[in-house]
Amino acid sequence: MTMQFDRVSVTKGTREILSEITLSLTEQRIGVIGNNGSGKSTFLRLFNGLEKPSTGTVRFGESTDDLRRHVGFMFQNPDNQIVYPMVEEDLAFGLKARKLPKAESETRIERVLSELSLTHLKGRLTHQLSGGEKQMVALAGVLVTEPEMIVFDEPTTLLDLRNKMQFMRVLATLPQPAVVVSHDLDLLAGFDRILHIAGGRIHADGRPEDVIPAYKALCEDLGGC
Amino acid sequence: MLTDLYIPGDSALHRARPAWKLALLFVYCTAIFVVTHPGMLGAGLVLVALSYGIAGLSARDALTAIRPALFVLVIIFAAQLWLESLGMAIYVTLRLMALLMAAALVTYTTRASEFTEGILALLSRAPAWVPKDKIALAMSLVWRFIPMIRAQFDEVREAQRARGLERNMLALVVPLVVRTLKTADEVAEAITARSLD
């Protein structure tokens, strides 16, 4: 399924956050880079319908108005993404919203916990988990809803090296297409496509080996990025 | 005041329907307040103690329920001692402790999701315009926010202590309120992202 942006602009007051973005995203792993305030997060929020375009259209396949049903969203801080105090009931939260029968909901939770090797956390209190465990539980909460695409907002910022490496391993095995906003250029190096956003526009779009070095070079050039 | 979180277990109280537990808590609190007799209070305290035993909870769990309100209890005890008598001070303080322990017993034995269902059951006869799902979710979020706000308070206190401002209430409250409001915004957004509304 293709995510399509057709002349999408987002304006807040008089300030244009994103300007005339036109893209067709078909790759499995897409990275998004750019400075703070460049419009990356706004761009990402459009995927899930958290942000509505001021003009233009965001389309997933044929769908424009129920993007949330198709696209899962991983926030930077898992503490703010986890809603319930117990792992098991937090994972059930998104499924209840989708009115899934209890038996099917339990089966899905068991399956996702098993796939992520998190079964031992099922009965644990979420606030007692480590940062890495919380991140995995937040990801499990997204995966149980079986999204067709997942977007990640700076997923490794709060992780130590061990947890970051574990997250990278899990990310590599996900069958869904993933769009990842990150300042961690190592994380994005093996991706299929990189979008560099600057000043609310797509400044560069291509393979990581082309876009990332150019981005680094711009940044080294006294704030040129 | 609800104090702490769910403590996993398989007792009769853990299995009881949340709507019943909330209804019984309401009856218990009303009875203890309306019938102002030491015998009633004594029976209430025995009932709470027995219920903690049935739920497999310890005296330490009961004390944990009271601890956050200890400061308020001391003030109430002192005020009653000054205004009334030692007997009245003991009576009023014990009554408040019984209520706190009873309320905590409900939170200790009820998962947040069950609590949501319990509130929905209690609201089932409310008019259609009442946003039952949202009220139930908001109330059950209390479980999630208590440890989060507690952790944020500890972080702010540490930061202010490092600056020598640990006794400055403004320096503690303002950052905590700002962070709590920001967190509330982010949690609300995450709920939106994970739901379909």
Image (tube, rainbow, N blue to C red):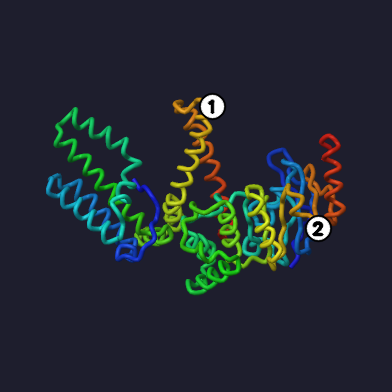
**Residue B127 at least partly seen:** no
The residue sitting at 15% across, 47% down in the picture is B35
Q: Residues within 10 Å of mark 2 (few under 14, many from 20)?
A: many
Q: Quadrant of residue A24?
A: bottom right
Residue A193: give x, y in percent of width and height: 81, 58
- In screen coordinates, is A78 left or right of B13? right
* Type of amino acid at the residue the image marks with label 2: Arg
**Quadrant location, the C terminus of chain A:** top right
Residue assigned mark 1: B163
* Front residue (pair B140, A111): A111
Residue at horizontal 50 percent and vertical 36 percent from the top: B176
Pointer 1 local density, CA inside 10 Å: few below 14, some 14–19, many at least 20 = few
Q: What percent of the width, then of the height, locates residue A68?
A: 63, 60
- Residues behind callouts 1 and 2 on a single chain: no
Q: For the image shown, how many numbered marks are present on the structure?
A: 2
Residue B173, compared with residue A199, is above or below; it is above
Say above or below: B86 vs A32: above
Question: Chain under label 1?
Answer: B
Percent across and percent down for residue B123 are 37, 59
The answer to whether B137 is drawn above or below residue A39 in the figure is below
Q: Which residue bears the numbered disc 2? A: A193
* Secondary structure of residue under mark 1: loop
Pointer 1 with pointer 2, Cβ within 8 A: no
Seen in the picture, residue A89 relative to B62 is either above or below; the reply is below
Of residues A13 and A168, the one nearer the viewer is A168
Q: Looking at the figure, which quarter contains the N terminus of chain A?
A: bottom right
- The quarter of the displayed image where residue A165 is located: bottom right
Q: Residue at x 37, y 59 (%)?
A: B110
Q: Position of residue A168 (x, y in %)?
A: 69, 58
Image position of B146 (left or right of A207)? left
The residue shown at (66%, 51%) is A161
